[in-house]
Amino acid sequence: MRYLLSYIYHFFISNSRHGTHSPFVYSLAEKVIYNPVFKSQYHVDYPKGFGPKYWNLLNKILSYWEVPRLNTDLKDSIAKAYWIEGPEQNFPELLNLVEQGKILIVHEPYQRAQNRLWKNLIADERVIVSINLFHFGIVLKRDGQRKEDFLLRTR
């Protein structure tokens, strides 16, 4: 029940591409998230057995950013993006990855188990951009941009 209420809340407070005041996030929304004809030209590798219901949208976003692989191993220093699932993550290690310019994809930020981790990540000054798409959230560092948290509606 709480999850459903969170979904309704997210729907009413989130924006579409209009109301997004960052050229970086607006471009992502316009070209990928709200573009039904966007075709992925870049191949992304995923962990074995990976297949959340929002895989198609995540795949479009990662291929748009030319991320070759979504990794679950936080020790793999050559990965560009990491899949974060479960609250038992090492918070300082996650922030260190963000400072290195890595992208973190947080599974289900509204789930009770993930919510505290999500809120702590987006509250930290090292996370410059957070994009909450309800079923997953993206955090990253982006030089030259002021800190902003975006809540975007998905179709």
Image: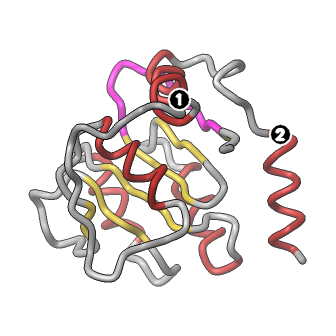
Of the pair 136 and 60, the residue shown nearer to us: 60
Q: Tell me the quadrant of the picture where the C terminus can be found.
A: top right
Looking at the picture, does residue 44 appear above or below residue 93? above
Q: What's the mark number on residue 74?
A: none
Residue span colored magenta? 141-150
The residue lying at 39 percent from left, 44 percent from top is: 60
Seen in the image, is 109 located left or right of residue 91? right
Colouring rule applied to residues = secondary structure
Q: Quadrant of residue 64?
A: top left
- Tell me residue 50's x, y (percent): 37, 75
Residue type at mark 2 is: Ile
Helix, strand or loop for the magenta stretch, by majority: loop
Residue situated furthest front in the rendering: 37
Picture coordinates of residue 138, whole percent (x, y): 47, 50
Front label number (1 vs 2): 1
Residue 92 is situated, as x and y percent measured from the top left of the image, at 36, 66
Whole-number angstrom distance, CA of label 1 to CA of label 2: 21 Å
Asked whether 148 or 124 is in front, the reply is 148
**Seen in the image, is 130 located left or right of residue 18?**
left
Instruction: Tell me: residue 74, above or below residue 28.
Output: below
Quadrant housing residue 6: bottom right
Q: How many discs appear?
A: 2
Label for residue 13?
Answer: 2
Q: Residue 142 versus residue 110: which sits nearer the camera?
A: 110
Q: Secondary structure at mark 2?
A: helix
The residue singled out by tag 1 in the image is 35
Residue 150: percent from left, percent from top = 62, 36
Mark 1 residue element: loop
User: In the picture shown, does residue 107 fall above or below 13?
Assistant: below
Q: Residue at x 41, y 69 (%)?
A: 84
Amino acid under disc 1? Asn
